Image: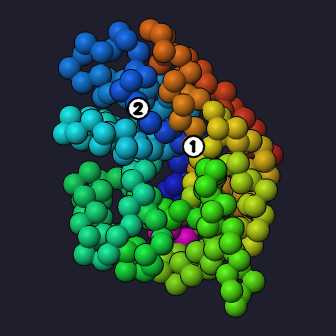
Amino acid sequence: MTRTELFELIQKKKSFLCVGLDSDPDKIPVHLKNTDDPVFEFNKRIIDRTHPYAIAYKPNLAFYESNGSAGWISLEKTINYLKKFDVFTIADAKRGDIGNTSKLYAKAFFEQLDFDAVTVAPYMGIDSVSPFLEYQNKWVILLALTSNKGASDFQFHDLKGTSNRLFEEVLIKSQEWGNSDNMMYVVGATQANMLADIRKIIPEHFLLVPGVGAQGGSLEEVAKFGLNNKCGLIVNSSRGIIFASKEIDFAEVASHEAGKIQELMEMILNENKLL
């Protein structure tokens, strides 16, 4: 999916919502446990009820890999099912290794599974990232500024000889590797106050923003500082949607929660003359 197509999808659905498929087998409603593939059945019902409100879906690979070969089967079935819908697909894999290993990671996610995007850790530099950038109309989503407690361990450190913090250096240096047509960045919603500084460095790029909902991030704050003239935001909510209920009505409740977020996003897009 190209950058233009992504913005057109945002305008079509009046939304920039990503639903995170953090489908923990231990949290799936009990009445699905006896199905042939509980994780896929759960995902399928979530997708069926939320796709009118979401432009993207983001399976977190840990919740599939932890289930061994059965988890990979669930993931493959999920991504194949998502191809029925007009959505952007993100493999939340956080890969990042030496070049020949990254080349095979890229093949796995872009050729075998046919995701639109994959999250990548930038710590090992250009040779760990460039294999992912060789695919046309596919996206690398670099970890830039995360919202976890340990983010302050490294990401905010000042770099000697520069006026930059480490996360800012990631933003600056990576501009030599890709561009706004094939690279996005992860910026946690709980770091919304930093978005103004980030937009000074990368005004045109899309940002994947997790942490809205259960993690306490504010959609209004993210939009205030993060929107650009092509929206430039994909805002993720996982637990706040998919596990809003663990009862038999879980998909209906997920639809309701996704719809509430979409309504707010539509208002924000209208206020900023993006529709």
Badge 1 density bin: few <14, some 14–19, many ≥20, Cα 10 Å: many
**Colour scheme:** rainbow
Q: Residue furthest front?
A: 153
101 lies left or right of 261: left
Q: Quadrant of the N terminus?
A: bottom left
Label 1 – label 2 distance at C-alpha = 14 Å
**Left or right for 267, reference 36:** right
The one nearer the camera, 11 or 135, is: 135
Q: Is residue 39 visible?
A: yes
The disc, 1 or 2, on the residue closer to the chain's N-terminal end is: 2
Q: Secondary structure at mark 2?
A: loop
Q: What kind of element bears circle 1?
A: strand
The residue sitting at 64% across, 50% down in the picture is 149
Q: For residue 203, say whether it is visible.
A: no
Badge nearest the viewer, 1 or 2: 2
Residue pointed to by mark 2: 23
Residue 233 versus residue 193: which sits nearer the camera?
Answer: 193
Vertical relation: 173 (above or below) 183: below
Q: Is residue 272 magenta?
A: no
- The three-letter code of the residue at mark 1 reads Asn
**Residue 151: % across, % down:** 62, 58
Name which residue type carries label 2. Ser
Q: Looking at the image, which residue is at 26% across and 70% down?
A: 101
Question: x, y (%) of residue 230?
Answer: 65, 59
Task: Name the residue tied to disc 1.
Answer: 236
**Would you call the spot at circle 2 few (<14 residues within 10 Å), some (14-19), or many (20 or more)?**
many
The image quadrant that residue 217 belongs to is top right
When the figure is inspected, residue 27 is found, relative to residue 114, above or below; the finding is above
| 131 left or right of 147 in image | left
What span is colored magenta in the figure? 180-184
Among the 4 quarters of the image, the one containing residue 173: bottom right
